[in-house]
């Protein structure tokens, strides 16, 4: 058996296991706690990093630097030189944009803002989706028809088009307002998906049993069925956050977001508008882009992790 | 909006490539491509009396010629379709001599009949609204033909500036003469003139929303009569480039020969990639002084900005030096008065400065705040002034066509917010800004240059804010005059002095004193707030064409969207 031994000394010490047995044991451990998932950790870590940037930045950095004209124009990050031969300084470690705003201050405020819009829009959208999806699936009949048709119609409307018109006519909007507008376009797919899940779950034994024992509709929907959908809902929520952020950034990059509140999208918009590409001011558009990428990778990892949590077949064996 | 423009720009390039492939007759080195900073909303309409992009897409640079062109270098009127003029002693009658042998591009002769016909059209049709037509209507009593090449104007009031103001391309355009044989019997308010003709050396080949193409007419009258040689370019294109970035990329890759205003940083970046790109000056600040100094327009009918003291407080708070440094990247200077800082304007600027009415280069926030507080406003918990539960707020409409505009307003919004005024900007598309926002008073504050006009005397600018041009909000301000709708005792006192100034001959010794006197009322009323001087950094590409105007080659200024661009085109020479 020596040729099968590994560096797993403890296993060797207790009793000799076959390779198959060890694999089985590892597999069982993993089943013990499906939440113990590296993708989930990495994803959450990235997002928490951005939140930490927001919190620590607010504590340790002068946020007044975020306003127009607070520093020299177009300074590069430390260790780089811009086209005019100016070098980056400690006062603006990530450089400044074309209007003298500090990039570090911009991302300290802007990155959590983008995340906030995504979370808020998704939270509202999901809540509506859960309510409507459960109602449609469980109550059925006319209610189901109305909700289904409504969400089917909404799903065909491209949100960005409508939102561009909305925002353009509203003029300057607040972050919350933007989140609310976006929420109006992210409820329909959770509604449809949850409705489908509920329809199949409705026929399962424990629901039938609960119904027979006289539980109220509300009780069955939210006490019996909802807990079984939690991992799935989480996955859907995270996917929705991603969609909401993409939509929000899309609007901001078009210059339709809030004006005096820094966001990553607006920073990119201003960079493009002011000719940052040809002037090689890569830090102006590059740093916000990297942060957005980090945010999306984090969300994606969480989504993949949640998928594995809710679907054991995806959990790979080592 | 920007995305749309970007797409338009991209498709324009594709289109150009396509038309080039179709036509194939004009090579790139025979073509001059000018930058257009706006969309051509109605490309088949060439009725320049009506609002919209009807002239600056090549029509009045290549097709329609002016009678005279004011030469900014010499201060003289260079004759073009006319050869000269005479005025009577009190400047109430002007007799213009037209050039012999001028022809429309369809072969018909250009005569005094065309001039009297077009002027009469402007005189008798109240509904045509272009600035030049409105000015003619306000000044001219009658026009008569003396013979085929002589026209006599009789004015309502003495006006020594009549020629330069109306027919001399002093600012942007001139009163353009239209062919009588085509316009006769048409309603000038609605006629589209969709197959336009002119006297210029180019004719329209095609126009779309994002570009206009003009081809040389080798049968041009000027070459036949010996007035001038045919210009060298076979084809001219005005192309909507869509924003600073694409403008810069097109310039760097030689797909544009003359670009609209860019920032100093962008210009330096273009030059780093393409050493053939030049500007007015070889070195910083590169840019040419534009006669239209920048200002914050105010609608004086909207509360709380109908209070002159609040407007003066804003004027006090604004830090002009910061605007020059941040928005113009140091390429301009703060304005001291409403006037362009031209040497020819110095006597009038000095008069205002001596009277102590000039504006500070730096803002004085505390003084401004004290003025706001004196009007009964107090700071609330959010750091915003409040009175009777209303916050002191202002929306500033800004044309989104140039970084200069949006960034200036960003700076002002910031300064006002710091002082406790809740300011925000409202970016608007170029056409909407000029077509709907400014003329109808549909704004609280706005960024523009509507006092523009004076280059060698003060009246042209000052005369734009008199009470006779006040119209209610929602009605079109005549020729963009007094869009502030400034009225009341101060405005009346101001108007009286300025109207008196109008009748004095150029260079009269009393004028500087009158300027100072009128300026007191202007300062007290503050219907607009002068900000900074305007400098235009226009990249010009010498890869295919040389002979662009510059400080060393100063045959005239470089603003190639003006009616004087005929001179630029005639000066261009093929490179290499």
Image: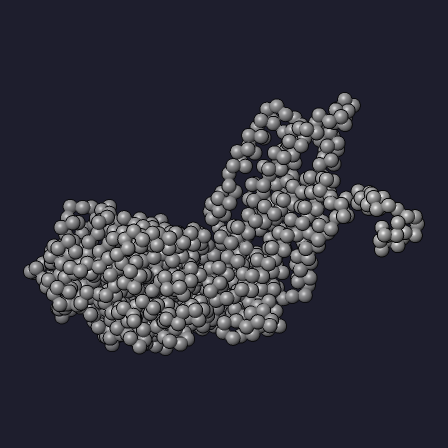
Give percent across and percent down for residue B514: 29, 71
Give percent across and percent down for residue B501: 25, 68
Numbered circles on residues, count = 0
Image quadrant where one finds the C terminus of chain B: bottom left
Give percent across and percent down for residue B39: 35, 53
Give percent across and percent down for residue B189: 24, 47
> Quick check: B371 left or right of B45?
right
> Quick check: B309 left or right of B194?
right
Q: Residue at x 65, y 66 (%)?
A: A61
Q: Nearer the viewer, residue B92 or A137?
A: A137
Seen in the picture, residue B233 relative to A240 is either above or below; the reply is below
Name the quadrant containing residue B219.
bottom left
Seen in the picture, residue B120 relative to B341 is either above or below; the reply is above
Return the residue found at the far left: B147
> Quick check: A47 left or right of B396?
right
Q: Nearer the viewer, residue A119 or B222?
A: B222
Q: Residue at x 56, y 69 (%)?
A: A76
Q: Residue at x 60, y 55 (%)?
A: A293
Q: Residue at x 69, y 39 (%)?
A: A232
Seen in the picture, residue A309 relative to B322 is either above or below; the reply is above
Name the quadrant containing residue B266.
bottom left
């Amino acid at each position: 058996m020596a040729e099968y031994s590994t560096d797993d000394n403890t296993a060797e010490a207790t009793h000799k296991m076959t390779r198959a047995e060890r694999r089985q044991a590892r597999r069982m451990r993993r089943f013990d706690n499906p939440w113990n998932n590296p993708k989930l950790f990495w994803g959450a870590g990235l997002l928490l990093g951005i939140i930490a940037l927001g919190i620590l930045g607010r504590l340790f950095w002068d946020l007044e630097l975020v306003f127009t004209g607070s520093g020299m124009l177009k300074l590069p990050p430390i260790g780089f030189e811009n086209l005019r031969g100016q070098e980056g300084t400690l006062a603006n470690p990530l450089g400044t944009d074309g209007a003298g705003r500090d990039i570090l201050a911009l991302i300290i405020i802007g990155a959590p803002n983008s995340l906030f819009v995504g979370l808020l829009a998704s939270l509202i959208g999901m809540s509506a989706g859960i309510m409507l999806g459960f109602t449609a699936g469980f109550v059925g009949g006319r209610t189901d028809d109305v909700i289904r048709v409504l969400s089917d119609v909404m799903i065909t409307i491209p949100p960005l088009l409508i939102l561009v018109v909305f925002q353009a006519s509203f003029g300057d909007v607040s972050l919350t307002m933007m989140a609310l507008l976006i929420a109006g376009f992210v409820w329909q797919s959770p509604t449809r998906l949850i409705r489908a899940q509920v329809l199949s779950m409705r026929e399962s034994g424990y629901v039938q049993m609960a119904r027979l024992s006289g539980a109220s509709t509300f009780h069955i929907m939210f006490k019996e069925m909802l807990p079984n959908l939690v991992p799935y809902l989480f996955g859907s929520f995270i996917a929705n956050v991603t969609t909401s952020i993409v939509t929000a950034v899309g609007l901001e990059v078009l210059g339709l977001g809030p004006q005096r509140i820094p966001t990553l999208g607006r920073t990119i918009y201003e960079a493009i508008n002011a000719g940052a590409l040809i002037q090689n001011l890569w830090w102006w558009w590059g740093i916000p882009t990297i942060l957005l990428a980090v945010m999306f990778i984090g969300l994606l990892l969480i989504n993949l992790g949640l998928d594995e949590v809710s679907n054991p077949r995806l959990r790979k064996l080592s | 909006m920007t995305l749309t423009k970007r797409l338009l720009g991209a498709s324009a390039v594709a289109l150009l490539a396509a038309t080039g492939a179709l036509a194939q007759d004009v090579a790139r080195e025979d073509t001059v491509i000018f930058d257009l900073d706006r969309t051509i909303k109605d490309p088949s309409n060439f009725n320049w009396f009506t609002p919209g992009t009807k002239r600056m897409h090549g029509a009045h640079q290549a097709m329609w010629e002016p009678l005279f062109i004011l030469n900014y270098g010499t201060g003289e009127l260079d004759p073009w379709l006319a050869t000269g003029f005479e005025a009577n002693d009190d400047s109430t009658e002007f007799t213009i001599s037209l050039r012999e042998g001028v022809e429309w591009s369809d072969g018909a002769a250009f005569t005094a009949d065309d001039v009297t016909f077009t002027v009469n059209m402007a005189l008798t049709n109240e509904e045509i609204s272009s600035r030049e037509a409105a000015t003619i209507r306000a000044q001219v009593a009658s026009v008569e033909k003396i013979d085929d090449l002589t026209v006599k104007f009789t004015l309502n009031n003495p006006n020594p500036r009549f020629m330069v103001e109306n027919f001399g391309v002093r600012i942007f355009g001139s009163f353009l003469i239209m062919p009588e044989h085509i316009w006769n019997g048409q309603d000038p308010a609605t006629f589209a003139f969709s197959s336009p003709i002119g006297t210029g050396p180019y004719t329209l080949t095609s126009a779309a929303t994002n570009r206009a193409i003009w081809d040389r007419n080798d049968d041009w009258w000027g070459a036949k009569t010996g007035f001038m040689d045919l210009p060298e370019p076979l084809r001219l294109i005005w192309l909507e480039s869509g924003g600073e970035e694409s403008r810069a990329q097109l310039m760097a890759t030689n797909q544009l020969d003359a670009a609209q205003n860019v920032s100093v940083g962008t210009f330096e970046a273009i030059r780093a990639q393409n050493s053939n790109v030049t500007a007015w000056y070889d070195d910083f600040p590169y840019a040419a002084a534009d006669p239209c100094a920048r200002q914050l327009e105010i609608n004086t009918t909207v509360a709380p900005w109908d209070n002159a003291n609040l407007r003066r407080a804003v004027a006090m708070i604004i830090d002009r030096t910061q605007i020059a440094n941040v928005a113009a990247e140091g390429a301009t200077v703060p304005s001291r008065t409403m006037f362009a800082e031209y040497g020819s304007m110095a006597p009038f600027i000095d008069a205002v400065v001596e009277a102590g009415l000039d504006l500070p280069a730096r803002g004085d926030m505390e003084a401004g705040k004290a003025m706001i507080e004196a009007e009964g406003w107090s700071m609330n918990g959010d750091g915003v002034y409040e009175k009777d539960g209303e916050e002191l707020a202002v929306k500033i409409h800004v044309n989104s066509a140039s970084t200069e505009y949006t960034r200036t307003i960003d700076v002002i919004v910031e300064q006002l917010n710091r002082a406790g005024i809740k300011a925000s900007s409202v970016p608007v598309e170029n056409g909407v800004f000029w077509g709907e926002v400014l003329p109808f008073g549909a704004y609280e504050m706005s960024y523009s240059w509507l006092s523009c006009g004076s280059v060698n005397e003060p009246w042209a600018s000052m005369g734009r804010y008199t009470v006779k041009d006040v119209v209610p909000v929602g009605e079109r301000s005549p020729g963009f005059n007094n869009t502030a709708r400034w009225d009341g005792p101060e405005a009346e006192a101001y108007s009286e002095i300025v109207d008196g100034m109008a009748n004095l001959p150029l260079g009269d010794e009393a004028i500087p004193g009158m300027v100072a006197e009128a300026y007191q009322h202007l300062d007290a009323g503050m219907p607009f707030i002068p900000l900074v001087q305007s400098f235009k950094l226009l990249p010009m590409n010498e890869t295919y064409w040389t002979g662009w105007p510059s400080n060393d080659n100063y045959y005239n200024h470089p603003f190639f969207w003006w009616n004087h661009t005929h001179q630029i085109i005639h000066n261009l020479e093929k490179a290499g």
